[in-house]
Amino acid sequence: MRSFVDLDQTFGSQPRELGAALARIDMGKGQERLFQDQRPELLQQLSEHARVASITASNAIENVVLDEERAERIAEGSPRFRNRNEKEFAGYRDAIDWLVRLESYEPLSIRLILHLHRLIFSHVDGRGGHLKSEENLIVSYEGGRREIVFTPPDESETPQLLSELLIRYAEAKQEGRTHPIVLIGALILDFLAIHPVADGNGRLARLLTSYELLSGGYGVARYVSVEQRIYESKNAYYASLYESQQGWHASEHSIWPWTSYFVRILDGAYEDFEQRVAAADRTSGNKQERVRDYILTQAPSEFRTRDVQRALGDISSATIRLVLNELRDGRKIRSEGSGSGARWHRT
């Protein structure tokens, strides 16, 4: 809410370099619509890959980590859960699946936020769907000692602050006071400062980010895992939040450290998206070339055979194994382990 009290003060000092990045994002948004008409099969493949990456990464940011094979099984279905981490992993799966299946997007409301929160903890009894009822400090244990990083507002203030944030955000969107991506950045900053639920604030904020991106026509969240990009830069993620939350209670903070980080993440996501589509176009007639290009330019630096199979669903396992062995013999990749569980690394 604090970021929306004085819009001129908050948004009037936008760093000049953000303008170029926001223009690239809008250009990517336009290209995306073209790809939706021309390459629907490819986009479906990218969407399936991004789904699993997003579920895995958003949980990993909160130290909810599973073995890769187990994570895939839970992402694909509902096996019997072994522990709490698996239940929370499945809950984020349910929430993101609900979100991306939406055909229309209503304005944000506390009811919608608590619905997403309920889904996150749908496999953990009684944990989701409620605003916090006690203090929830933001704490760091870096270096082995406990340090309070930020003190959110008292739980008695939470309903009013959250309601006012959503109203002011909706008004700012309607007025078009600044670029919609900047408004989403300010929304998420305030949401995390309010810290409205007892547990799961980070995951909930990332779901709300995807919801608002999709609502605004920025469909990159379907095809490239924004959560994965955040996970890979999570030190910068936490540092930018910390910097922007300083002075937040007195409305003396700056949204730009956090919002600049958020814009860079989206700019990179669109660049990644366009590179993947271009790579598929370059090698569309040769399946081995498609596999080779994916491994060398698009796959994570560490990956498994199943990652390639998921990204290139129309290519046989035999072709993928052939290219993997060829690249290993050429010392462009190396492997640890053997069989389906082998981990591959680009050299």
Image (cartoon, rainbow, N blue to C red):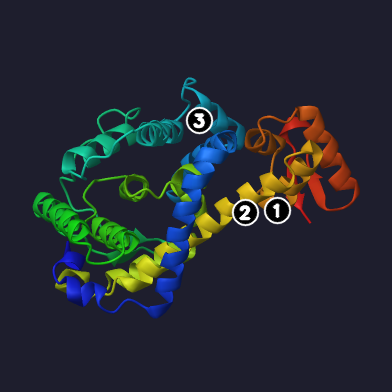
Q: Residue at x 32, y 76 (%)?
A: 14
Tag 2 residue: 275
* SS for callout 2: helix
Q: Tell me which amino acid carries mark 3.
A: Ala
Q: Estimate how packed mark 1 is, as few (under 14), some (14 to 19) or many (20 or more) residues with alpha carbons within 10 Å.
A: few
The mark lying in front, picked from 2 and 3, is 2
Residue 321 % position (x, y): 81, 34
Between 31 and 165, the one lying in front of the other is: 31
Q: Residue at x 17, y 52 (%)?
A: 166
Tag 3 residue: 75
The reply to whether residue 247 is in sight is no
Pointer 1 or 3: first along the chain: 3
Residue 278, relative to residue 117: is it above or below? below
Q: Tell me which amino acid carries mark 2.
A: Gln
Q: Estimate how packed mark 3 is, as few (under 14), some (14 to 19) or many (20 or more) residues with alpha carbons within 10 Å.
A: many
The mark lying in front, picked from 2 and 1, is 2
Circle 2/circle 1 CB separation < 8 Å: yes
Q: Is residue 182 left or right of residue 151?
A: right
* SS for callout 1: helix
What is the spatial separation of the Cα atoms under label 1 and label 3, in whole angstroms? 25 Å
Tag 1 residue: 297
Residue 106 % position (x, y): 22, 40
Q: Is residue 317 left or right of residue 74?
A: right
Residue 66 % position (x, y): 53, 38
